[in-house]
Amino acid sequence: QKEVEQDPGPLSVPEGAIVSLNCTYSNSAFQYFMWYRQYSRKGPELLMYTYSSGNKEDGRFTAQVDKSSKYISLFIRDSQPSDSATYLCAMTSSGGSNYKLTFGKGTLLTVNP
Amino acid sequence: NAGVTQTPKFQVLKTGQSMTLQCAQDMNHNSMYWYRQDPGMGLRLIYYSASEGTTDKGEVPNGYNVSRLNKREFSLRLESAAPSQTSVYFCATALRGGGTMIYEQYFGPGTRLTVT
């Protein structure tokens, strides 16, 4: 079993839709959870991060972590064509030599005008 | 500030040729990373340098070597390129120390490498 599983999609939605992106993981030591956004032919950029369980909201974006289920989600409200990108989840543990992130494979999202 | 820069942007090599991918950052970050990204495989860590003077293997180090030249620069070398090394290569940096975590990595624009 891979440490992080992410449905690669592709996911195609109409403008204004609510989008739900998800990852599951197997390593219970993970405590920091991130979502990166990657536009076509660009490097990834950090969108949101969450520590441990709970929700975090930033504008139209909400990140949720359920550590009991080892499941994280990113919700995008009122999706826009400019949200079209690949979304990668990433996670890491705290303490020790936590220099590395473990990434999901990414979900390709297209928002159609 | 340029952030994280990578050279070259594109490269085509023949099997067996060697080359060095360059990465430089002006963010004064301690940690630097090299990833490759392939369709269906996501981002995979090749090598990383937690701080100047140290380097460690990541998930897929075979066929690569790295040099942390100074705090700003981290290079990736392919000694004898193989078609399996056709990929997009990303360099990333992260601030470490002072209580910060490494969750925020800043990525360069990538190098698209084709090995024929």
Image (spheres, grey):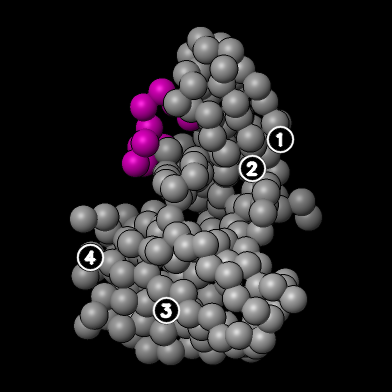
Say which of marks 2 and 3 sits in front.
3
- Whether tag 2 and tag 1 are in contact, CB under 8 A, the answer is yes
Q: Say whether residue B24 is visible.
A: no
Q: Identify the secondary structure beneath mark 1.
A: loop
Q: Distance between the residues labelled 2 and 3?
A: 27 Å
Q: How far apart are marks 1 and 3 (CA)?
A: 33 Å
Placement of the N terminus of chain B among the 4 image quadrants: bottom right
Are labels 3 and 4 assigned to the same chain?
Answer: yes
Q: How far apart are marks 2 and 4 (CA)?
A: 29 Å
- Whether tag 1 and tag 4 are in contact, CB under 8 A, the answer is no
What residue does disc 3 label? A73
Tell whether B44 sits left or right of A29.
Answer: right
Q: Distance between the residues labelled 1 and 4?
A: 36 Å
Residue A67, by quadrant, is bottom left
Give the crowd class for mark 1: few <14, some 14-19, many >=20 residues within 10 Å.
some
What residue does disc 1 label? B9
What residue does disc 4 label? A26
Q: Residue at x 52, y 24 (%)?
A: B77
Does the magenta portion include A40? no
Q: Identify the secondary structure beneath mark 4.
A: loop
Q: What residue type is labelled 3?
A: Ser
Magenta region, residue range: B55-66
Q: Residue at x 49, y 21 (%)?
A: B83
Does the magenta portion include B61? yes
Which tag, 2 or 1, sits closer to the chain's start?
1
What residue does disc 2 label? B110
Q: Residue A42 versus residue B96: which sits nearer the camera?
A: A42
Q: Residue at x 40, y 59 (%)?
A: A104
Letter of the chain that mark 1 sits on in the rendering? B
**Residue B34, percent from left and from top:** 50, 41
Letter of the chain that mark 2 sits on in the rendering? B
**Residue B94, percent from left and from top:** 53, 57
